[in-house]
Amino acid sequence: MARPTQAIVDLEALRHNCRLARDLGGDGQLMAVVKANAYGHGAVAAAQALEPLVSAFAVACIEEAEELRNAGLTRPILLMEGIFEAEELEIAAQRDFWVMLQNHRQVESLESASLPRPLTCWLKLDSGMHRLGFSLAESTALLERLRASDKVADEIVLATHLARADELDNSFTPQQITAFRQHTQALGAPCSMANSPGLLGWPESRDAWNRAGVMLYGQSPFPASHPEADKLKPVMTLQSEVIALRDVPVGDTVGYGGAWTAERASRIATIPVGYGDGYPRNAGNGTPVLVAGRRAALVGRVSMDMITVDVTDLPPISIGEPVELFGQAITANEVASHAGSIGYEIMTRMLPRVPRRYLGQ
Ligand SMILES: *Cc1c(COP(=O)(O)O)cnc(C)c1O
């Protein structure tokens, strides 16, 4: 039998979450963010499941866009950081990739390019994230300049990114929304602000285009329960099986570095998943692991290929018992909270060694 560690990816759950994102966006068009291998879920499989439900895809770089095109996906694909080299512009025009323009060098490359047809462009504005984009004060002049260029297709979308939309009681998001609206209202261009926390929690951020990422994969961007986010269904389940069991006497330690000491006679189960699969090495003692349907605690260090779990309090466990690392009963967010991380990273970091098995294809 093959190594039992695998990521089950439920495409019906993915579609469910996508329909929720679309409904929240009202008349706005939905862009499915499938960067970073669709947050670890498999970009092609995820995009194929989502294509009938969305207007466009978004990725971080042209290599990711080409993977989708080569697999036969036909919707427009936005390069959210724009081009890194001028040569990408011609490929973008040929393959219907849309480009974000986020700095002056990109604008100059575009203006001096020779292209088979005008490119669909989004203009990125910096409303407070201070990572990418032009200042709001520049927006009017830049938009005029782009509208005058024959390299730029007619409809230019004005975009910005929210820095703290996952903090529902923080006033930074309304400040960003207000500043962005003040500078763009009179420009007569479609706008895009909302990411997942925007779509779910900040109705004022919803607009002509909404960009949903993490919510498609069923993870809430919020730390607490939320009426809309609680409707999401987790898409990825990382599962495995118990491959070894032993009794460890009081005072003995488990694993590398003796990082956990048995304070009572303990029953320890070994699971074949580790940081070589993307399971976080800094998941500490006490990280929950579901063994035979019950919660148990990770003990000792995560090694490359294995972890150890204290199953002393569980009914008798045998080799082959099913294990869930995260997915249904334990969320990626919960594992993340034991590893100094966030659910986004826990899903995205799943390595190719973990086979993906797709349900609902
Ligand atoms: C990744 C990303 C998104 C999606 O964010 P989520 O929080 O995962 O929904 C949206 N817009 C931009 C610019 C991004 O980089």
Image (cartoon, helix red, strand yellow):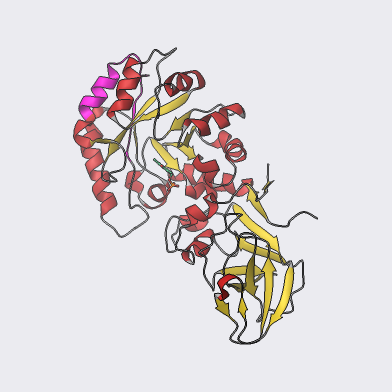
Q: In what quadrant of the picture does the N terminus appear? A: bottom right
The quadrant in which residue 194 appears is: top left
Residue span colored magenta: 140-160
Q: Report the residue at 25% width, 40% height from top.
A: 180
In magenta segment, residue 314? no
Where is residue 153 shown, x and y percent of the image? 37, 19
Ligand 1's quadrant is top left
Where is residue 5 shown, x and y percent of the image? 69, 57
Residue 190 sits above or below residue 115 on the image = below
In terms of depth relative to the viewer, which is nearer, 31 or 316? 316
Left or right: residue 318 versus residue 214 is right
In magenta segment, residue 145? yes
In terms of depth relative to the viewer, which is nearer, 352 or 201? 352
Q: In what quadrant of the picture does the C terminus appear? A: top right
The quadrant in which residue 258 appears is: bottom right
Q: Is residue 75 visible?
A: yes
Number of numbered labels in the structure image = 0
Farthest left residue? Answer: 137
Q: Report the residue at 26% width, 53% height from top.
A: 172
Residue 264 sits above or below residue 97 on the image = below
Q: Report the residue at 46% width, 34% height from top.
A: 61
Q: Is residue 26 visible?
A: no
Left or right: residue 120 versus residue 278 is left
Where is residue 155 shown, x and y percent of the image? 36, 23
Farthest front residue? Answer: 257
Where is residue 314 shown, x and y percent of the image? 68, 79
